[in-house]
Amino acid sequence: MVTRIGSQDKDLQELFCDYVPRVFRRADFRRWCAWGQWSDDYHAFALMDAGRVVANTSVMRMRLVLEGREVTGYQLGAVGCVPSHRGRGLARVVMNAALDACGDAPVLLFANPTVRQFYPRFGFQPWKQMLFAATYDAVPEGPPAPTLSLDDVKVRAGLAALSSEGLPATERFGARGYATVASWTVANGFARPLRQLGSEAWVFAGVEGDTLYLDDVFAREPFDLRAWIPRLIDRPIRAIRFGFTPERYWPGAVAAGEDTEADLFVRNLRLSPEAHRFPIMAHT
């Protein structure tokens, strides 16, 4: 029987946290849980054996933005089975339970290339994601934009407010209200620094080589992102790469190849034929 684990099931959350590193070597949920980020939007559908989670599919309810329209959808994550129980069809059982909970709503997930054949069995189809880049020369100037830490409960609350109430980074294919998803990436040490651009705009950004990587923007109102570039860099840059479709903040950015790091699969969801990239900080 599939067990549904929600925000109030603290003992079961512990078992889920024990399961995750047995399947995903670099992932952990303990810090995320300690930050209080397991909300009512997140449920894990787990199979238990001898008091331990052995297979799971998690569902995150999301406010998806599709061509400027906001719709309720879901994103799946933490899909897997511990090595000792593979080959028994358990992943199929938890996938079906999770999708039953989603009903006819749009569903998406990001998967590594080794499991491309698994998700089409459940009605998913692959969808291409693009990378976006712009040539841009800039040098550091002015006081550096402050770095914020999600260890601070006030910063977590601020990110939640900007994400929920502010502008989505992209209107083409994005989301709103996904601060708890972004915080998981931070809690696992996968995110670039969170920088404050005034009181009403925060970005995840960092410099590698001569390139500034802008992974996401959380802002209450439109603002001039270019004016802040010199304060986001600690060395001269010649290019910018975006972790989202930057039509709002950098309309001159160009598609710079396909994103091959994580394969997008969609179900009950038709996306724009225009090039797009779902914000990477919104990936579960």
Image (cartoon, rainbow, N blue to C red):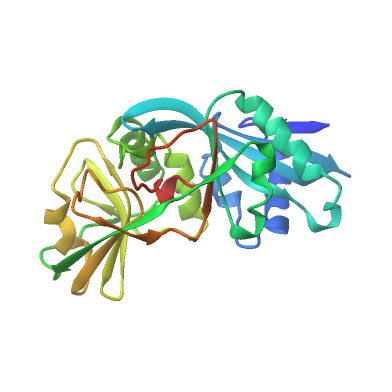
Quadrant for residue 271, please give it.
Answer: top left
Expressed as whole percent of the image width and height from the top left, the position of residue 273 reads: 37, 41
Residue at 71% across / 56% down in the picture? 23
Tell how many labels.
0
Among all residues in the image, which is located at the extreme top?
104
Expressed as whole percent of the image width and height from the top left, the position of residue 91 reads: 76, 44
Answer yes or no: is residue 5 visible. no
Answer yes or no: is residue 124 visible. yes
Expressed as whole percent of the image width and height from the top left, the position of residue 259 reads: 44, 58
Q: Is residue 106 left or right of residue 136?
A: right
Taking depth in this image into account, of 111 and 191 the one nearest to the observer is 111
Residue at 13% across / 71% down in the picture? 139
Expressed as whole percent of the image width and height from the top left, the position of residue 36 reads: 52, 39
Please identify the quadrant where the N terminus is shown.
top right
- In the depicted structure, whether residue 276 falls above or below residue 43: below
Taking depth in this image into account, of 18 and 64 the one nearest to the observer is 64
Residue at 35% across / 37% down in the picture? 163
Among all residues in the image, which is located at the extreme right?
50
Among all residues in the image, which is located at the extreme front?
273
Q: Is residue 15 left or right of residue 27?
A: right
